[in-house]
Amino acid sequence: MAKHPSGESLHFAILAVDTALFTIRSGELLVRMVRVNRPPHFAGSKGLPGGLIEPKETAHQAAMRHVHTKACIEPQKIYAEQLYTFSEVERDPRGRVVAVAYLALVPWESLSPAEQAGSAESWWATPGEAKKLAYDHDEILLVALARLRSRTTYTTLMGKLLPKEFTLTELERAYESVLKTDLDKRNFRKKILKVGVLSELPRKRADGPHRPAQLYKFSSSKVEYIEVL
Amino acid sequence: MAKHPSGESLHFAILAVDTALFTIRSGELLVRMVRVNRPPHFAGSKGLPGGLIEPKETAHQAAMRHVHTKACIEPQKIYAEQLYTFSEVERDPRGRVVAVAYLALVPWESLSPAEQAGSAESWWATPGEAKKLAYDHDEILLVALARLRSRTTYTTLMGKLLPKEFTLTELERAYESVLKTDLDKRNFRKKILKVGVLSELPRKRADGPHRPAQLYKFSSSKVEYIEVL
DNA sequence: CCAAAAGTGTTTTTCCTACACCCATGT
DNA sequence: ACATGGGTGTAGGAAAAACACTTTTGG
């Protein structure tokens, strides 16, 4: 018999959502953590933001609701896509809980100062720091990272991690930090401009003792398929 | 409040699975259909095989159990991977049911005569015939077809649709029927042999008034990533 | 000997890779 | 004037695409 966290017994599995929410701060990939305190199994622990699905909301809506209440990030700033559904019988020691996991992205620049800073309840961590998480969240995070890297190579998903306007160097740094590789500056620019998903803006950014950089944006707000990076 | 198909009311969404099971018969892609008779919404209808998840089984196990009982195909012959979780609130008019959908494949040659022939309860249909399905199964089938096509281009998933031994022409036909394109015979052979996922068998097949064809198998039973077709 | 599918190589074009210097600016 | 990051082109090699004839067999 499954047991709801409230203590109520159920004849069926109950449904939850968990979200791996990423951002990039100065070229470094970060994931949003929340404090988890659920004795006896997970006291003083941490994990991904998540919670139960209500009968009248979709999994996506539930994921965004819990990101809002638990991770304290405004959902309308977030891009999210379904990642995988984790249904191992023993994944939650308190009862039968099946989790629909989401991969979510938010541009650092769209976050408020409070959202950037975090708190004792929810904060940004590097994937390297996000270990020993509650439930099966270590596994969910690994799957999310793999999916993020994979989709980064053949879609314009990166547009959901960057601010609306960016330089080609910033775009290249973002790819390098997600993919953990070094890219050749000239070849990267040739390729990304050739596939035609970027628009040149009528503006440049001057931010130091050097030539100002041309600003670009992604032409479409849709995540599109492109040929490899 | 969600309602279980039994009539029982629940405070939470309940969990089901649905499986899009494909095979290839003489170069033609087929999907397994089951009769659906659930008045008042779906009387004398058809759909994908599926059903509820029991508290002590994973979604994958539940999918295979229902393929066995409803679609009458032996699960151990089947390769299945998770497709997507459908959680629209109104997807099942009888109550709140969230479905974990699976993409499944089986080689036609591994099916028993009864499994090949089908019955009034479950049968093989072309995707073109599989329209106006119960629930949201039209959408699930579309997503499954898209995923099958997509994964076919960058993995060895095709190995799960073909018999253990096959000729290069059969392999090419299978790719052509799934991808709905024509491939160049010489380029196809060069590429598929170069990536090194096939093993030549010490045998040929003579099946007509023409030169016998060399038989091959996939070297690994794992679905591997390969570079594009 | 004829029909039918199996099998095979070369040329052209395209794409990827590696690589080094000048440009525009702020101090 | 100099330090800093922005921006550009080309040559060589690898992979993809286009394309037609010979081989082996059964009837």
Image (cartoon, coloured by chain):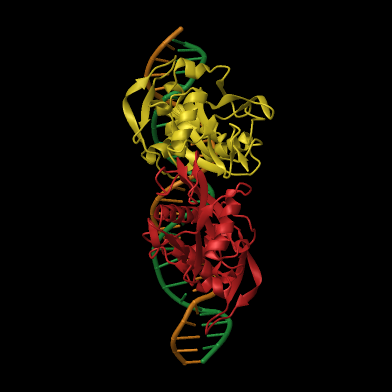
Chain colours: A red, B yellow, C green, D orange
Quadrant in the picture for residue B129: top right
Q: Which of A102/A3 is in front? A: A3
**Residue A199 visible in the snapshot:** yes
Looking at the image, which residue sits at the far left? B202
Quarter-of-image position of residue B156: top left
Out of B22 and B217, give the one closest to the viewer. Answer: B22
- Residue A150, how many percent across, how many down? 47, 53
Residue B9 located left or right of residue B214: right
Say which residue appears at 34% left-offset and 36% top-offset.
B220
Q: Judge left or right: residue A64 versus residue A37.
A: right
Q: Position of residue A215 (x, y in %)?
A: 60, 71
Q: Is residue B124 left or right of residue A33?
A: right
**Total numbered circles:** 0
Q: Nearer the viewer, residue B2 or A213?
A: B2
From what the image shows, is residue A122 above or below residue C23?
Answer: above
B116 with respect to B201 (left or right): right
Residue A224 makes an appearance in the image: no
In the rendered image, the residue lying farthest to the right is B40
- Residue B99 % position (x, y): 55, 39
The x, y position of residue A83, in whole percent, is: 50, 50
> Which residue is at the far front?
A8
- Image vertical order of residue A204 relative to residue A60, above or below: below
Is B49 drawn above or below residue A122 in the view shown?
above
Residue sitting at x 50%, y 38%: A11
